[in-house]
Image (cartoon, coloured by chain):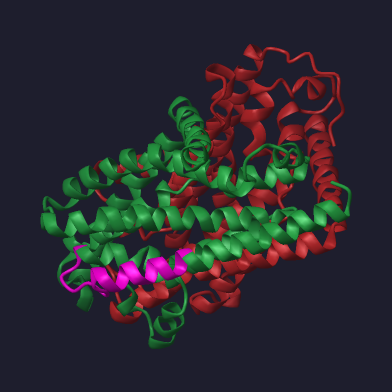
Chain colours: A green, B red
Amino acid sequence: MTAAFVAKYAACSRIAAAQARRERGEVYGRVAFFAVILGVFSSLWRAAADAGLPVAADPKALVWYLAATEWILLSVPPIHVDIQEAIRRGDVVYQLGRPMSYVIAELAAGLGLLAVRAPLLGATAFLCAFAFTGWIPPSSALATVVPFGLVAAALITALHLWIGLLAFWLQDVSPVYWVCQKLMFVLGGLMLPLDLYPDFIQRVAAVTPFPSVLAGPASFVLPAPIVTPGELARNLAIWCGVTAFAVWWVFRRAATALTINGG
Amino acid sequence: MTRRSNSLAFARALVTTNLKATVALRGAFVMQVAFMALNNLTFFVFWWALMRHAIVIRGWRLGDVEVLFGIVAVAFGLTVTVAGGVRFLGRFIDEGDLDTLLTQPQSVLVHALGLRSQPSGIGDVLSGLMFIAWSGQVSWSMLPVVAAAIAASALVLLATGIVFFSLAFWLGRVETVARQLWELLITFALYPEPLFGGMLRLALFTVLPAGFVGYLPVRIVRAPSLINVALLATGAAAYLGFAVLVFDRGLRRYASGSRFSTFG
């Protein structure tokens, strides 16, 4: 039973990964974007250090911090778009009838895409950050960033799944996605470590999942990480639980509504 | 002359019709405008937080970054509102959607550009104007200069979009790559000019003209000079001329999609 359960969702992951390997245009675009952003920011941090920015005492570490946050974020596949389209076109009805959970199948497919994108973008992050700084953080720091980064990327994929499911009510989930993305940008400390933001932003960030998925893992390359590995593992576990519940609850409501409306 | 004025009248009618159709879905329109404005404001939080600590970065203050953001946002908003079809040009070409336009008496390019107005562009325009107002660097007497700088910036942005997406005439399915190139141009245009030097700066004033979209208009607003105004005007005209040329050349290679449909 368990083996069969795992096998069918693993098949979803494999199919999605195979598709991602064939359609590489978007990933290559992200690689180019990644290189550009790291180049721009390595220049910006040098300029900020010249201007006396306190945290920019080590601009090289800040470039690696950005490489880590961008690696996590850019690796996440935009599955909410496909889910939204399936719901808008009505294709979701055919998928609901299959002998597998629609939600788990979509998540598995998302993780399959992630498995293709993360190594390529990880290599880009490493090479570009090294090229722009001529420095590599301690191997222990990198060894901590990678597993936490992968878990964080999986959690953001689940978050995108939740956003995609909102299309049952909203039709177009782009505004929700934009807001989520921008919250991640600021409250997650995507480009700037959170301690550079004002206190009130830091306090708000602390009660959201965003620092745990971006600033937390990435801060291990900084001289003073914002969390310990144990704390980050606990926070990620909590937010995984919260996200799983939110996805389950939203899909349950949607499935009920579909039944009431006659499918 | 008559043909040009006909094209302008047609473009105006197309934009008006598009805007009416967009505003008709009032809820969706308001939501997209509001979220896009919020989106831009949130992005600016980064600069605000950074420049609380480093007041001047290579001669640029927060006000200068606000002017840059404002000009690029308004230019982008105008482009996707008035000529929203530019973002779909690659798909039109690749999927044979130009068929229905070829039989029309009006310019194919003007018609294609006017097909898809993006309501979120209004959000860009509004947030851009807010940035310019907050910057405290633009006096009332400077408004015509700012408006001209924005118009030139929008034209360069549009021209570059036409060139990137017209690559579909020769290369087929390039929508993703073209879109990413266009976004790359906008990304570069949103960072202060002094961050880039050497060959990169040369590229930003030629193949990826972020310099004409953001830097030169900001230079003109900060310290107006005839040379820079002439450079920007010449650049905008040259890029637009080149874009029209590329599209016309591409159109000669266009292979029909045998479409029998109507556009709206």
Residue A245 at x, y = what percent? 57, 65
Q: Which residue is drawn at 63% across and 39% down?
A: B87
Residue A250 seen in this snapshot:
yes
Is A6 above or below relative to A186?
Answer: above
Q: Residue at x 51, y 61 (%)?
A: A181
Most distant residue in the front direction:
A1
Residue A210 at x, y = what percent? 44, 68
Q: Which of B147 and A15 is in front in this view?
A: A15
Q: Which of B164 and B68 is in front in this view?
A: B164
Q: Nearer the viewer, residue B195 or B184?
A: B184
Is A228 above or below relative to B262?
Answer: below
| Left or right: A223, with A245 as reference point | left
Q: Main secondary structure of the magenta part?
A: helix
Q: In which quarter of the image is residue A46?
A: bottom left
Q: Which of B204 and B32 is in front in this view?
A: B32
Residue B216 is inside the magenta segment: no
Q: Which residue is drawn at 53% across and 39% down?
A: B179
Q: Quadrant of residue B249?
A: top right
Q: Which residue is drawn at 77% across and 60% down?
A: B29
Residue A150 at x, y = what percent? 35, 52
Magenta stretch bounds: A221-240
Residue A259 at x, y = what percent? 83, 52
Is A202 above or below relative to A127?
Answer: below
Residue A230 is inside the magenta segment: yes
| Left or right: A146, with B64 as reference point | left
Residue B22 seen in this snapshot:
no
| Left or right: B119, with B153 as reference point | right
